[in-house]
């Protein structure tokens, strides 16, 4: 539910986990998420809308302000676009040579 840039998201390779117990736990959690996808999304949407519309003060107090996080992500994307569109500047030592 927290907005993040897509370029920092990585697929978890459960099979690469060295610990058998940890692989088993991750597989169990993945199965749970797959079985409960609709309920998870429904709950996430409810919490998001409750926070955005400030419907429930208890939930609002215990959650992040999603609009602030979304605005921060937009700002980050804008800064990255500007950074990536500027040509690389040579360092002083490269300019002297």
Image: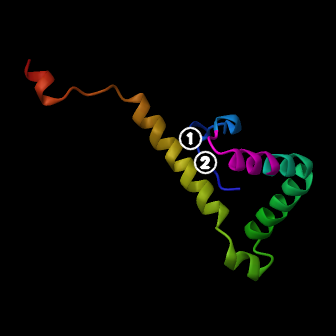
Of circles 1 and 2, which is in front?
1
Q: CA distance from mark 1 to mark 2?
A: 7 Å
Q: Residue at x 68, y 71 (%)?
A: 63
Frontmost residue, 77 versus 13:
13
In the image, 72: left or right of 35?
left
List x then y, in percent, for residue 11. 66, 36
Q: Which quarter of the figure has residue 1?
A: bottom right
List the single residue furthest toward the bottom.
Answer: 58
Q: Nearer the viewer, residue 41 or 35?
A: 35
In the image, which disc is placed on residue 8? 1
Query: Residue 33, relative to residue 55: is it above or below?
Result: above
Q: Residues within 10 Å of mark 2 (few under 14, many from 20)?
A: some
User: Which structural element holds mark 2?
Assistant: loop
The segment highlighted magenta reads 17-28
Q: Check the picture and name the quadrant holding the C terminus.
A: top left
Q: Position of residue 73 (x, y in %)?
A: 57, 50
Decide: marks 1, 2 in contact (CB < 8 A)? yes
Vertical comparison of 53 with 40: above or below? below
Q: Which mark is residue 76?
A: none
Residue carrying label 2 = 4
Residue at position x 60%, y 58% from top?
69
């Amino acid at each position: 539910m927290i907005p993040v840039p897509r370029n920092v998201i990585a697929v978890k390779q459960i099979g690469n986990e060295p610990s058998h117990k940890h692989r088993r736990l991750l597989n169990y959690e993945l199965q749970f998420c797959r079985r409960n996808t609709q309920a998870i999304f429904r709950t996430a949407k409810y919490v998001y809308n409750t926070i955005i519309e400030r419907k429930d003060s208890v939930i609002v107090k215990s959650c992040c302000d999603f609009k602030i996080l979304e605005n921060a992500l937009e700002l980050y994307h804008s800064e990255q676009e500007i950074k990536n569109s500027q040509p690389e500047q040579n360092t002083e030592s490269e300019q002297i040579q």
